[in-house]
Amino acid sequence: MGENELGAFLRARREAISPAEVGLAGSARRRTPGLRRGELATIAGISVEYLTRLEQGRDRRPSPEILAALADSLRLTSDERVHVHRLVKAVTGGACQGSAPPARVARPTVRTLLDRLDSTPALVLNRPGDLLACTTGYRRLAGPVGLLDAEPANLARFVFTDARAQAVFPEWSRVADAQAADLRAATALGDSHAGRLAEELSIAAGVSFSSRFQSSAALPARVGVERWVHPAAGELVLAYESLELPDADEQRLVVYLPADEQTASALELLTRHKAVS
């Protein structure tokens, strides 16, 4: 885990929020993105000196009241608020996420859910991004591009170390940013297994991974759109939803849906072709 994950997260969110979002007038003379420390401190009702200590890691135990004020001021989502509190617990010894190895299988009920989804591309991941289970639809989507070749298949490892990844994802940089941010978030909370994968990728992929990992203090989006290029179905535009499963293992269910009619038709043809063959 980094030395100052809470401070890095707060600074990343401060730099990501525009003055207009909090009702302040913008200025062409700004030398840094987002809010200035003084502006955030005023909105949150704390001193600039204290906010500086938090961002620099000289104070890592803010009170719940201070965290709530900063969360409100930074317009944090529910997931981001939980993440901030867990970062504080990780420093104070209240989080022990890294003590148990990540799950290697999905629960029977989750596998049954995947069976019900069947032709819809969906998968279950553990904390470091290993694929634990998936639907037939996901195998038809990801198998031909090589994503399932490794055992276990791991999304981050494929994105950063497989030469085919940049052809599969036309917007590779965005996908890479999200994968690095996922690993950074898990590592920040003391997940030693995610940390070891990050070390592996820093060596195997070099700066293309390490620069993203070091700069990705904010959480990745759990909903969005990905573009894929499939050898049989062509270019696909897929909307995804990433849902946390209620379990101590912190598994995630990711479901892909067609984002336009062309993709819907292509996926239907892919399913029909595989069914016939």
Image (tube, rainbow, N blue to C red):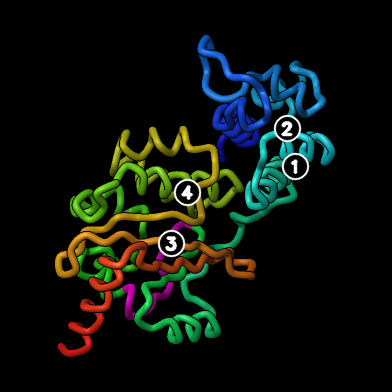
Residue 48 placement (x, y as % from top left)? 74, 17
Please state the extent of the stretch shown in magenta in the rendering. Answer: 128-138
* Residue of label 1: 92
Mark 4: which amino acid? Answer: Leu
Asked if the residues shown at circle 1 and circle 2 are in contact, with their CB atoms under 8 angstroms apart, the answer is: yes
Of circles 1 and 2, the one toward us is: 2
Q: Is residue 210 magenta?
A: no
> Visible in this render: residue 207?
yes
- Label 1: few (<14), some (14–19) or many (≥20) C-alpha neighbours in 10 Å: few
* Residue of label 4: 183
**Disc 2 to disc 4, C-alpha distance:** 22 Å
Q: Of 155 and 92, which appears nearest the observer?
A: 155
* Residue of label 3: 240
Disc on res. 60: 2
Q: Earlier in the sequence, mark 1 or mark 3?
A: 1
Q: Earlier in the sequence, mark 1 or mark 2?
A: 2
Residue 152 placement (x, y as % from top left)? 35, 67
